[in-house]
Image (tube, helix red, strand yellow):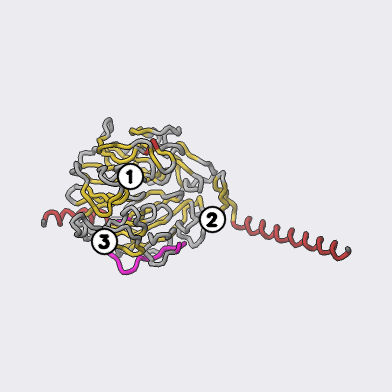
Amino acid sequence: MKIQTCTLFLLLLSSFCVNAQYVSGGNGHALILKPSGELYTIGRNDYGQIGDSTLQNTWLPKKVKRIPGIKAASRGYDHSLAIDSNGNVWAWGRNNYGQLGTGLVMDYTWPQKLLNHSGFIEVQGGHWHTVGLKADGSVWAWGHNFYGELGNGTREHSPYPVVVLQENGLPLEHIANVASVGYHTLALGANGEVYAWGSNTYGQLGHLEAERQAVAKRVQGLKGVKQVATGWHHSVALDSLGRVYVWGSDPSSQRGEATLRHFKNIEVLDHLPKIEKIACGSWHTLAIDENQEVWTWGKNCNGSLGTGDTLSTTYPIKIQHLKDITDIGGGCFQSLAVDKAGTYWTFGFNGFGQQGQKNPKWNYLFPQKLEMTEENQTAEVTGFWGTHNFPQKAIFWLLAALLFISGALNMVLYRKLSRS
């Protein structure tokens, strides 16, 4: 017991004492956490998920303010999350089921501090819920709970954190890592075992016993796991030998909110080199191998696999254009990567400007460099063909001109009516 506790402490300490570099995406917005602790957001902002007190989309990275010493970050589907140096969770964006943990079910366009809870070292955003891991190895969740996403044995939504339970009714403990994107969550124990709860429509919890599960249950057949990741309906694990396991839906067969195929059992992906890190978008998966090259598989209708085409695939393909990669992240049809030189790369869907590119384009099929700058701030108008950017002064003078023309037309109309 002492050895297990010590192992857990070392795992958690190593993941939190040094600022983590993090890239990931939500439903049209992306987050980038620099090693310096500066957090930037890009893209869609209709619920305030950018965190700049506006509802304007942006193709320029916006630095998130008001949070002291950011140590970790995560995206939800339409909300954003961060952890400060004191272990406090901050949240902003959509809050229709209480996923921000504020107690009030209303959206926020700037970061809100989670009250009455601290000691968090990791936080993950699902579709309409949030999952947090504390330094003591306990797991907490809040927000939407129709599929049992909160893991507390009920299906009642909660705007406040509730502790995740095991099948025996006791709190889940000794957890070192959590992952959530859609309606289910995976938790990695310090002993390398994996636990799952939430939606199970496609067997993403590691079994086909029920369509949903409201408490954490151990995934059978997995040992020695060092990292877990989840997509909308699929799950991925990486063991200490560099082997990748997949189960749940086959996201390459995704059609709307459903998929046509799923894995009946947990499968090991063959023909891969030794893998060092994994990450998931909603409908695809990324992996970094021992040579710091990137492999992707899943749905590719918007180029989120970075292969230069829109062909989806069940099995991994190596991206030829990325080398020396140290971190990866996925969003809803978007992917991000960072190389050892500190260059950020992004590819896939760009309907809200989330790729951070000056020249608007609907999809990017190859990785694009992302310039991390806040210069030349712009106002944005988003339409079907993407995000169009205009200088703030130009917007001001355009509105002034429209007001002048409107006033002139009204004066002419008034004079004509007076003469008649």
Q: Name the residue at 30% across, 65% down.
A: 86
Q: Name the residue at 32% across, 40% down.
A: 287
Give the left or right position of residue 381, taking residue 322 as reference. Answer: right
With respect to residue 116, does 60 lie above or below?
above
Percent position of residue 4, x then y: 14, 54
Q: Secondary structure at mark 3?
A: strand
Residue named by callout 2: 377
For residue 328, say whether it is visible: no
Name which residue type carries label 1.
Thr
- Looking at this view, name the residue that lies furthest to the front: 210
Give the left or right position of residue 7, taking residue 310 as reference. Answer: left
Which quadrant of the structure image shows residue 407? bottom right
Q: Residues within 10 Å of mark 3 (few under 14, many from 20)?
A: some
Percent position of residue 260, x then y: 38, 36
User: Label for residue 201?
Assistant: 1
Gap between marks 2 and 1 measured at Cα: 44 Å
Q: Residues within 10 Å of mark 1 (few under 14, many from 20)?
A: many
With respect to residue 35, does 313 lie above or below?
above
Q: Name the residue at 27% across, 49% down.
A: 186
Residue named by callout 3: 163
Q: Secondary structure at mark 2?
A: loop
**Magenta residues (range):** 106-123
